[in-house]
Amino acid sequence: MLTATPSRRLLLAAGSAALATGAAGLVVPARAAGLPPTRSMRGGSNNYRPGAPIVSRIGSGGFLMTGTVRRAGDGAPLPGQRIQIWAHTTEGHERDPHSHGATLTDANGVFRMEMPQIVPAFGQAHGHLAFDSEGFETVFLRPVMSSPRDTRLSADFVLQPV
Amino acid sequence: MARTRAILIWAMLTAAVGVPLVVAAQSPLLAWRQPVYIAAGLSGVAALALLLVQPLLAGGYLPGLPPRRGRRVHRAVGVLLIGAVALHIAGLWITSPPDMIDAMTFAAPTAFSHLGVIAMWALSTAGLLALLRPRLSARAWRAGHSTAVGIAVGASAGHALLIDGTMGPLSKATLCLLAVAATGRVLIGLRVWRLVQRRTP
């Protein structure tokens, strides 16, 4: 009777190992074909305002939005790309023009934007980011904070050349 | 004894309904919301609280409101409940139209949006059936209203629990649990399945 427990555990371990290998095996061909582009998230474009101005920071800051911008396929970092950011914060609603701002990626394809603390709205503490400039397909992201007390949030773009 | 029991029941109901409202009305999130968004949120909390009151009235569980009188009040509270949900939706629509369009079309990224819309349709169905009741057979009325109400309460509880908003987590969970339990208890107490069962001998 005692052997029943280890054998079940063994079966589960072997089964999950097989599953993991299978899943990893599925990932490999995708990687071989190059870095896939980031898809727009559902609801990402909500309350978007085209042409948000480039600002050194949104409002009085206190919260950090960061991320990277790379090219699909070879994954090369993309410098000088314009990323627009907006959210419901302690200083305004998503729809307010002053809640919106844009920044450019540095030489390493990294962007950083100081903004006011994001607070939960419409059920989740979340931010919005957009890439909608020339040369690559438009992408709208809507990352969610794991806790509303977080003081930073990041989102990465992999852009598909057009 | 009966009087003490009555006072106790009413006190517990007042607390179950009142505490979540008071907690939500003191949420720090309100400082960063416009009045219309605040009103929309609180209407939602009020609607959730009424979901606990409704089955107790329908089942005649509240002291001083036996089934017949209880159901008259149940009808009035039903109108109030639909009004609260209408305010909830209208206020959220004004606050962020694209988020509400996503929710209504089941295109939102959040599961609670889907549950909220399901609850809205189920509640509307329950209310519509109440309006049409004179034209319905007893069987159709019971089966229809009970099913719609069951879906509305279950989906509303899920909707509320998944939201990170102004409600306090403990008072919210308690209210949801009580609403689901009371609805279940009354549906079982009324043996709503019997009329449906008789059809198939």
Image (spheres, grey):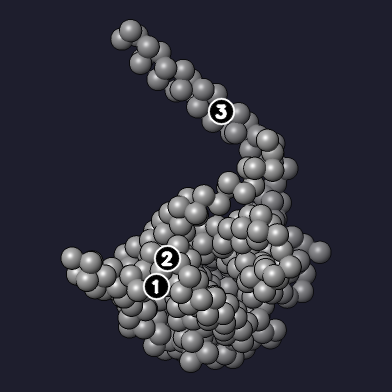
Q: In the displayed structure, would residue B142 be above or below residue A65?
A: above
* Label 1, residues with CA under 10 Å away: few <14, some 14-19, many ≥20: some
* Label 3, residues with CA under 10 Å away: few <14, some 14-19, many ≥20: few
Can residue A140 be seen in this snapshot?
Answer: no
On the image, numbered disc 3 is attached to which residue? A19
SS for callout 1: loop
Is label 1 in contact with label 2 (beta carbons under 8 Å)?
yes
Q: Are marks 3 and 1 on the same chain?
A: no
Numbered badge on residue B65? 1
Measured Cα–Cα span from mark 3 to mark 2:
55 Å
Of label 1 and label 2, which has the lower sequence position? 2
Judging from the image, mark 3 belongs to the subunit labelled A
SS for callout 2: loop
Residue B83 x %, y %:
57, 82
| The C terminus of chain B: image quadrant | top right
| The N terminus of chain B: image quadrant | bottom left
SS for callout 3: helix
On the image, numbered disc 2 is attached to which residue? B60
Examine the image and state in which quarter residue B53 appears.
bottom left
Measured Cα–Cα span from mark 1 to mark 2:
6 Å
Q: In the displayed structure, would residue B43 be above or below residue B134?
A: below
Q: Amino acid at mark 3?
A: Leu
Give left or right: position of B49 versus B144: left
Q: Amino acid at mark 2?
A: Gly
Judging from the image, mark 2 belongs to the subunit labelled B
